[in-house]
């Protein structure tokens, strides 16, 4: 094996190790971005419905323990009223 081959191998090993350390960091960042939710104010969230449109019939709503209890939203942060509404409303099919 020549010096050049050894150098190439060492470089490959270093790159492989660097990639191995980078992948978990990237995975963590992707999870954090996916878990990030918008602020209520940004989405113009309110506790009142917009006509027929309300959180309880929005596909993003995750209900609380009872139908009247606050739940969570997949895209808006914080406690969400089943009778609330925001600009990200998407009718549940
Ligand atoms: S996206 Fe908006 S309307 Fe739909 S559940 Fe979340 S807060 Fe309510």
Image (cartoon, grey):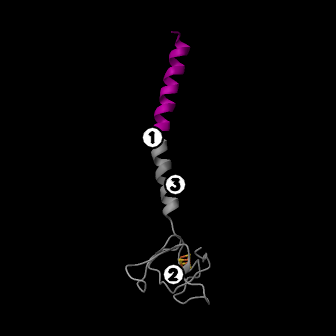
Q: Are marks 2 and 1 in contact (CB under 8 Å)?
A: no
What's drawn in magenta, residue-wise? Answer: 1-20
Seen from the viewer's position, the closer of residues 41 and 58 is: 58
Mark linked to residue 56: 2
> Picture quarter containing residue 44?
bottom right
Q: Secondary structure at mark 3?
A: helix
Residue 19: % across, % down: 50, 37
Q: Secondary structure at mark 2?
A: helix
Which residue is painted at 54% across and 90% down in the image? 48
Residue 89: % across, % down: 60, 77
Residue hosting label 1:
21
Seen from the viewer's position, the closer of residues 67 and 55 is: 67
Question: Which quadrant does the C terminus fall into?
Answer: bottom right
Q: Main secondary structure of the magenta part?
A: helix
Residue 62: % across, % down: 46, 74
Residue 80: % across, % down: 47, 80
Q: Residues within 10 Å of mark 3 (few under 14, many from 20)?
A: few
Q: In terms of sequence position, does the residue under pointer 2 or pointer 1 come before the other? A: 1
């Amino acid at each position: 094996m020549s010096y050049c081959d050894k150098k190439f191998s060492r470089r490959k090993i270093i790159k492989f190790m660097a990639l191995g350390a980078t992948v978990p960091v990237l995975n963590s960042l992707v999870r954090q971005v996916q878990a990030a939710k918008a602020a209520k104010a940004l989405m113009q969230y309110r506790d009142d419905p917009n006509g027929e449109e309300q959180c309880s019939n929005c596909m993003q709503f995750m209900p609380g323990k009872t139908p009247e209890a606050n739940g969570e939203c997949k895209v808006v942060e914080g406690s969400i009223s089943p009778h609330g509404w925001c600009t990200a409303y998407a009718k549940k099919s």
